[in-house]
Image (spheres, helix red, strand yellow):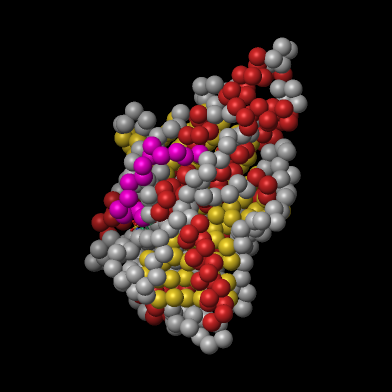
């Protein structure tokens, strides 16, 4: 049986039925299938809050991430990869369902519970004969459904000696550093799969690089002699951008010296001190000793200097960058372990490896940490893929893609029909090196979590290859318009300025088309919701 015949069968019957059909043919057993004939495996690795400014395949200014870059080097890097709603739970729901937040029902982290009985790509793949697993952060309140195997951390998870919720419902505290543990568990699942003749889909979801950036003790000493360059917009005054001016995510004012930067002090009155202690108190004594030994001289120096204003802001920025970079180092090493495993087991020829994050993050741009806004740093998310045989694209892919596209991509790869209610579009043609003429020319975004931590107003908007229109609504009614070519840092809000009436009308039109296409109610000037 030829590969195209098998693909046809797989597409028509689903992977398991196709495999059965192949096995039933005289002289054509699965043992005689070549690697290239087997349905593709999927390893989907997603981190939390990892941004492309801190991944050297995208940006070489700050740190080196050799293992993440290996994925791009043997495949593709998406240069315009966006999320639909820049927040953890919502991104995960978009990724699993292929639908925008309003359609999958999980619009924010604080009020939603994911209906895990709804169709997701892992469930479709399992029905089609794949063995499926998810390990690590889930963050959707309900428990996973539709997986052969799952093992998740509750909520945000803990870096040290974390709890895991097991498939039998037990919650068990285990010893170690979470990034290693999630990798160990994932590789163990690969080793112990019940039916290795089946194709598999493995989802590895890390807590790293989420706040409060607790590094592995092995990486504490790294980056201490590095002075990271200050982003151009570090001292942004938010002129002309009302919602940006009221957000509470400034490094100077809202990043906590103890909770975020480990500058504990006996006299501290920080409201977050208890939380900080509850995290570091989880460490084993030897790890804790190394941790305290490392940070104590930095604390002594910090408390003696009593920094203020820009000196304090820049000091905090350097500490933030260093701790974040240390947490990335462990993540990069552990992604390397997964790649090595796949290589050693000759799996790379028929395994698609995806690396992405649940959203981008501010590394001091606009003076900020966190995400949520439709501005570029947090709208973008890293997306690289190591491609198996048969997918021949290489290098950069510049088409605009979004996290609702992953589900249809994996379905198509597995030969499963893409249901009509999925809102994303399969990336498979792009992975084959094609550039479909009718590819989307704009993406839609909608952020819902307000009032909430960091005080980012609700907003929706449209971004095309050059312009972006955003409407902040709820207890505000404020529009922003950017020319990303002339103003890539989004400092100059053109909305309402003379000369931009035609552009505004055009972008309003694109927004309306997308809100109708995705069936998200139009919310112009909504004051109370
Ligand atoms: C926590 C963090 C916030 C962060 C949200 C959402 N605070 O609440 O800083 O924005 O998660 O992040 S913390 O004090 O608990 O660290 S998300 O990536 O999970 O959506
Ligand atoms: Ca996140």
> Residue 507 at what x, y percent from top left?
54, 71
> Toward the viewer: 218 or 206?
206
Q: Residue at x 69, y 35 (%)?
A: 349
Q: Is residue 388 magenta?
A: no
> Toward the viewer: 379 or 470?
470
Q: In this view, does 377 lie to the left or right of 2?
A: left
Residue 319 showing in the rendered view: no
Residue 269 lies in quadrant: bottom left
Q: Is residue 59 left or right of residue 231?
A: right
Q: Is residue 115 magenta?
A: yes
- Quarter in which the C terminus is drawn: bottom left
Residue 31 lies in quadrant: top right
Residue 373 showing in the rendered view: yes
> Residue 62 at what x, y percent from top left?
58, 64
Q: Is residue 504 left or right of residue 304?
A: right
- Quarter in which the N terminus is drawn: top right
> Residue 42 at what x, y percent from top left?
58, 37
Q: In this view, does 449 lie to the left or right of 465?
A: left
Q: Residue at x 68, y 30 (%)?
A: 8
Magenta extent: 108-121
Q: Which residue is drawn at 56% across and 40% down?
A: 418
> Toward the viewer: 87 or 62?
87
Judge whether 70 appears above or below 119 on screen: below
Q: Is the magenta stretch mostly helix, strand or loop?
A: loop
Residue that protrudes farthest toward the top in the picture: 26
Judge whether 135 appears above or below 82 on screen: above
Number of dots carrying numbers: 0
Residue that protrudes farthest toward the bottom in the picture: 498
């Amino acid at each position: 049986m030829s590969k195209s015949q098998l693909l046809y069968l797989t597409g028509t019957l689903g992977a398991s039925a196709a495999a059965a059909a192949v096995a039933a043919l005289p002289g054509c057993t699965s043992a005689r299938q070549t690697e290239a004939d087997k349905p593709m495996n999927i390893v989907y690795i997603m981190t939390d809050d990892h941004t492309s400014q801190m991944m050297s395949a995208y940006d070489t200014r700050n740190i080196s991430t050799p293992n993440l870059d290996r994925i791009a080097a043997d495949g593709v890097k998406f240069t315009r990869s966006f999320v639909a709603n820049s927040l953890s739970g919502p991104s995960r729901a978009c990724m699993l369902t292929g639908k925008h937040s309003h359609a999958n029902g999980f619009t924010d982290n604080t009020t939603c519970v994911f209906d895990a009985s709804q169709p997701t790509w892992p469930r479709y793949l399992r029905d089609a004969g794949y063995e499926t697993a998810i390990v690590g952060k889930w963050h959707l309140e309900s428990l996973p459904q539709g997986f052969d195997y799952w093992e998740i951390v509750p909520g945000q998870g803990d870096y040290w000696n974390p709890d895991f919720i097991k498939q039998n419902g037990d919650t068990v505290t285990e010893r170690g550093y979470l990034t290693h543990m999630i990798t160990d568990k994932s590789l163990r699942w690969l080793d112990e799969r019940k039916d290795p003749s089946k194709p598999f889909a493995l989802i590895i979801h890390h807590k790293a690089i989420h706040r409060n950036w607790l590094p592995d003790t092995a990486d504490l000493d790294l980056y201490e002699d590095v002075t990271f360059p200050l982003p151009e917009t570090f001292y942004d005054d938010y002129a002309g951008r009302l919602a940006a001016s009221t957000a509470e995510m400034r490094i100077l004012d809202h990043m906590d010296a103890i909770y975020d930067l480990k500058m504990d002090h006996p006299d501290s009155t920080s409201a977050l001190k208890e939380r900080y202690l509850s995290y570091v108190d989880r460490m084993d004594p030897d790890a804790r000793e190394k941790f305290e030994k490392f940070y104590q001289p930095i604390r002594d120096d910090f408390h003696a200097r009593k920094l203020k204003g820009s000196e304090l802001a820049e000091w905090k920025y350097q500490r933030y960058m260093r701790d974040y970079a240390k947490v990335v180092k462990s993540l990069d090493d552990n992604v390397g372990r997964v790649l090595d495993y796949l290589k050693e087991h000759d799996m790379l020829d028929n395994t698609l490896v995806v690396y992405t994050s649940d959203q981008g993050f501010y590394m001091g741009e606009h003076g900020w940490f966190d995400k949520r806004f439709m501005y570029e740093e947090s709208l973008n998310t890293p997306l690289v893929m190591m491609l198996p045989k048969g997918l021949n694209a290489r290098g950069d892919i510049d088409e605009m893609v979004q996290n609702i596209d992953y589900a249809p991509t994996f379905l198509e790869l597995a030969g499963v029909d893409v249901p009509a209610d999925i809102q994303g579009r399969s990336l498979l043609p792009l992975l084959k090196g094609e550039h479909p003429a009718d590819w989307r020319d704009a993406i839609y975004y909608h952020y819902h979590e307000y009032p909430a931590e960091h005080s980012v107003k609700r907003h929706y908007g449209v971004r095309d290859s050059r312009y972006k229109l955003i409407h902040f609504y709820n207890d505000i009614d404020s529009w922003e318009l950017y020319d990303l070519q002339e103003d890539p840092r989004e400092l100059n809000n053109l909305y309402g300025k003379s000369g931009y009436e035609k552009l505004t009308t055009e972008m309003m039109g694109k927004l309306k088309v997308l809100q109708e296409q995705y069936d998200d109610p139009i919310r112009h000037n909504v004051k109370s919701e």
